[in-house]
């Protein structure tokens, strides 16, 4: 019998009235060593609204120089996701892509618990996971935010905000991790009113506990559970950082593995699990990643693009650019060396595109030997420079069998209120312009 979320939720909740000042909330969070606090609003109709004040909010307020005497009711707080107490873990895991990191449990308009990813992970049985699959294949899209030890603390915090990250890894000149700075450390800094212009190495935590990319998923779960960490810093055999896995990503992986386990035990599935299998089939059809390259697939890319287009239309100074990349003469590679070599090249190019892109960029396999990149907050001139860098990097890269290949790239910028099809036609036209002009070049459309 799977536990309900009421059974695993935390009952001792840190809360504050919405009429209190921000400073009081910060003091409570610092003294309790917690990253969030529930803000309660009593309405005139005897109904309560629940909001969450998180460490991410505090970072934004600090960078925007918000006065700590401001009342919580005057801030734009995020309304908390409310769950029913009788839901089981699978119900929540099924929604992990859209579920907030922290959720509240409410009954009869009263707060009875708060649920986090940590609570769910601590109640997962790793025996149902595949023991052999390593995390190396899972971290391609989950790059860590890094900086050097002499970087100012305020600059490091801005990097965390820009990359939507809750931590930053401090590295030495050999790109080896020497420390970590997390949102938990940030709370203590603002509570003590520390000087944020001093180097980040004065405030970082050390040493950095890492996990090899050759570790299995089950070992990753044990690691994050035993260490009570919110994330896993993953390294290769040279001890260089190759990625970072958060609790949310682990939960998504666990859910998929749990579904596989249920399928294998199909003859003992209850009626509830049969309904779950139906949901799993729908999820499989809507899988977000390309099997070969581990990049986002076209369907998932389109969802990201639709969101960025709506944002670009909403704000005046919001730029958005696309890059369409095509490997030159790729058919010749498949014909001469075979499709296995061709697949290896596609995987290598995928890694190059991912490593050379920013955390805010979206990289996807468009189809065949074509890749597409979406660059938010980037105009066409900046995108052209990015494309030139990608083209040169691929040209200089030494591939095992073919030695060297080149690529052609089309670049375009989104125009206000145009539809997606028009945008695609323009970047596709730019790509063909590059190919017709001799290949191994970048053209703007």
Image: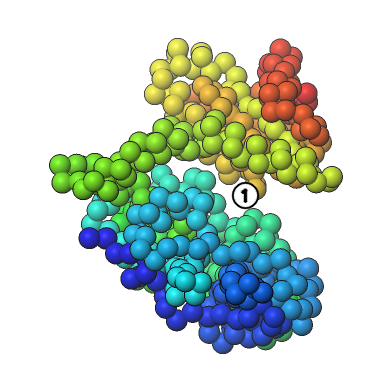
In-front residue for pair 294/214: 294
Can see residue 42?
Answer: yes
Q: Whole-percent x and y of residue 62? A: 73, 72
Residue placed at 46% from the left, 16% from the top?
A: 334
Residue placed at 55% from the left, 56% from the top?
A: 144
Left or right of 193 on screen, residue 40 = left
Task: Classify residue 162 by image quadrant.
Answer: bottom right
Left or right of 20 on screen, residue 331 = left
In-front residue for pair 56/441: 56
* Relative vertical location of residue 210 with respect to residue 136 in this rendering, above or below: below
Residue placed at 70% from the left, 20% from the top?
A: 425
Q: Whole-percent x and y of residue 107? A: 45, 70
* Relative vertical location of residue 59 with respect to residue 400 in this rendering, above or below: below
Name the residue at the front extreme: 45
* Relative vertical location of residue 425 with respect to residue 141 in this rendering, above or below: above
Task: Classify residue 306 by image quadrant.
Answer: top right
Can see residue 225?
Answer: no
Q: Whole-percent x and y of residue 24? A: 66, 85
Q: Whole-percent x and y of residue 287? A: 44, 37
Left or right of 380 on screen, residue 117 = left
Looking at the figure, which quarter contains the C terminus? top right
Q: Residues within 10 Å of mark 1 (few under 14, many from 20)?
A: some
| Residue identified by numbered label 1 | 359
* Relative vertical location of residue 237 with respect to residue 202 in this rendering, above or below: above
């Amino acid at each position: 019998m799977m536990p309900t979320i009421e059974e695993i939720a935390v009952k001792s909740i840190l809360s504050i009235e919405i009429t209190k000042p921000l400073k009081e909330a910060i003091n409570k969070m610092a003294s309790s060593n917690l990253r969030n606090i529930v803000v309660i609003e009593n309405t005139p109709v005897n109904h309560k609204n629940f909001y969450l004040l998180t460490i991410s909010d505090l970072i934004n307020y600090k960078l925007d120089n918000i006065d700590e005497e401001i009342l919580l009711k005057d801030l734009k707080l995020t309304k908390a996701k409310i769950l029913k107490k009788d839901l089981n873990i699978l119900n929540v895991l099924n929604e992990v892509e859209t579920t907030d990191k922290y959720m509240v449990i409410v009954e009869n308009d009263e707060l009875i618990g708060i649920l986090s990813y940590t609570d769910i992970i601590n109640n997962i049985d790793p025996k149902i996971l595949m023991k052999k699959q390593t995390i190396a294949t899972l971290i391609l899209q989950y790059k860590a935010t890094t900086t050097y030890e002499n970087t100012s603390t305020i600059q490091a915090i801005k990097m965390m905000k820009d990359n939507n990250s809750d931590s930053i890894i401090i590295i030495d000149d050999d790109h080896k991790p020497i420390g970590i700075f997390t949102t938990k450390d940030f709370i203590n800094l603002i509570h003590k009113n520390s000087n944020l212009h001093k180097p980040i190495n004065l405030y970082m935590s050390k040493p950095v506990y890492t996990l090899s990319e050759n570790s299995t998923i089950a070992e990753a779960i044990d690691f994050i559970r035993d260490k009570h960490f919110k994330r896993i810093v993953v390294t290769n055999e040279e001890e260089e950082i190759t990625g970072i896995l958060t609790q949310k990503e682990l939960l998504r992986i666990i859910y998929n593995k749990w579904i596989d386990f249920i399928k294998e035990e199909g003859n003992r599935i209850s009626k509830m699990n049969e309904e779950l299998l139906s949901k799993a089939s729908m999820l499989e059809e809507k899988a977000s990643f390309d099997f070969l390259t581990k990049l986002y697939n076209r369907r998932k890319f389109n969802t990201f693009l639709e969101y960025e287009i709506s944002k670009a239309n909403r704000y005046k100074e919001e730029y958005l650019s696309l890059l369409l990349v095509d490997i030159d003469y790729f058919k010749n590679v498949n014909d001469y060396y075979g499709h296995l070599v061709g697949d290896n090249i596609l995987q290598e190019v995928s890694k190059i595109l991912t490593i050379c892109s920013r955390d805010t960029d979206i990289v996807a396999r468009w189809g065949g030997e074509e890749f597409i990149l979406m660059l938010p907050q980037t105009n066409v001139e900046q995108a052209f420079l990015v494309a030139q860098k990608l083209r040169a990097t691929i040209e200089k890269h030494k591939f095992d069998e073919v030695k060297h290949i080149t690529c052609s790239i089309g670049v375009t910028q989104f125009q206000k209120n145009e539809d997606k099809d028009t945008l695609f036609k323009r970047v596709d036209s730019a790509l063909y312009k590059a190919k017709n002009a001799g290949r191994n070049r970048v053209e703007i459309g």
